[in-house]
Amino acid sequence: MKRVFNFSPGPSALPLPVLEKAAAELCDANGSGQSVMEMSHRSKDFKPIIEKTEALLRELMGIPAHYKTLFLQGGASLQFAMAPLNLAGVEQGAPRKKAAYIDTGVWADKAFKEALKYADVSVRASSKEASYTHIPAAPAPDPDDAYYHITLNNTIVGTKWNKLPETGAVPLVVDASSCILSEPLDVSKFGVIYAGAQKNLGPAGVTVVIIREDLIGAAPSWTPALLRYDTHVKEGSLYNTPPCYAIYMVGLVLEWLKNLGGVEAIANINREKAGLLYSYLEHSKAFLSPVAKAARSLMNIPFVYRDVPSDKKADLESRFVKEAAAAGLVNLAGHRLVGGMRASVYNAMPIEGVKALIGFMEQFEKNL
Ligand SMILES: *Cc1c(COP(=O)(O)O)cnc(C)c1O
């Protein structure tokens, strides 16, 4: 069997023990004589799977009792619409509600643009002028803001919020797609946390939403049933057929994480992994991290050549990505919008993968 070190930003590598368990159970899950893919979502066989997945998520994240957890579809991109619809949507003809957005990159901007359709949202701070290489100072919300939205980890540029904005009574809504479960998070500080699964939780197809109870049920009457949080809360994420297999896989990933020691334990490993790569980049003669130190992501680590003539840049970047792939280190190209290189080192990336990458880069430098 061939396994590479996969630095893909998403969908991303899964822990090998998880894939092996899924393979072993593929045709007969739990002695049911069926694959999880073949089960009715309302069957006695599937019920314990979704219940176990939810219980593990609640345990690992320390989710307080007054928060609901949902397994939805549509990715983080659908949450860009669901959050404003449910938290700030109004009946037809009523005055629009306000909400605050902080612009820290492509995903934050997409979330903002989608919310414009449903509410009177505005960007209160942005780091766009600096190519998003830092997190801007976060202004206080207006008292009548329905919510305050940030992207907790910016997957493309490799920044993260190390200190949350103070939003007082205004609920903080966060896109945690690329950092959920990478380090401890005090859930009680948030109104809504949402995350597509395909970076740190499992395969694509399921989106986790964690929502404070008092924020549920305010969607305007014209909201499609499937886009209302209260629809899914009432039905325990079983209003319609959920992505059963993806939920099952998230359960296996959470079990793996629990066996490893939980979020504190993986956070230590993640800090060590990122620390190795950042300190190499600081001393490298060929590469550097373009991101401000105080804002560096643990999960997505972009790097660029220190100085190359602009006419050679694209060639050298593709040479790096190609030679790395030949050495078993794949998906290291930067996002198509920003170029350069990027190593995504989510929970499932072992420290050996990061060490192998650094070893490769040291060798590559010598041959430049
Ligand atoms: C990947 C990603 C998204 C997009 O997620 P989809 O599941 O494709 O909708 C949104 N936000 C962040 C921070 C991401 O990393």
Image (cartoon, rainbow, N blue to C red):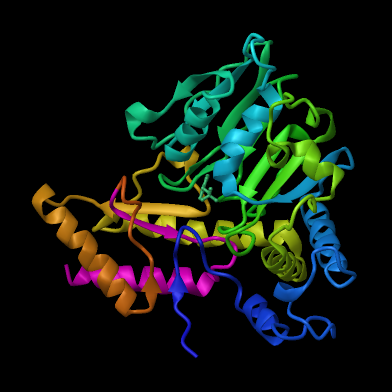
Left or right, 116 with respect to 20, comes to left
The number of callouts visible is 0
Q: Position of residue 36 (x, y in %)?
A: 74, 74
- Give the extent of the magenta segment: 339-368
Image height of 88 relative to 42, above or below:
above
Q: Position of residue 63 (x, y in %)?
A: 81, 46
Q: Position of residue 62 (x, y in %)?
A: 81, 49
Q: Position of residue 16 (x, y in %)?
A: 60, 78
Left or right, 31 with respect to 349, comes to right
Image height of 209 relative to 214, above or below:
below
Residue drawn at 18 percent across, 72 percent down: 367
Instruction: State the residue in front, 359 or 32.
Output: 32
Left or right, 104 with respect to 313, comes to right
Instruction: State the residue in front, 104 or 207.
Output: 207
Left or right, 125 with respect to 367, comes to right
Image height of 206 relative to 100, above or below:
below
Residue drawn at 34 percent across, 44 percent down: 290
Q: Is residue 344 magenta?
A: yes
Instruction: State the residue in front, 176 or 365.
Output: 176
Residue drawn at 55 percent across, 71 percent down: 350
Image height of 53 relative to 154, above or below:
below
The image quadrant where one finds the C terminus is bottom left
Could one spot residue 282 in this view of the protein?
Answer: no
Could one spot residue 340 in this view of the protein?
Answer: yes
Q: Is residue 266 magenta?
A: no
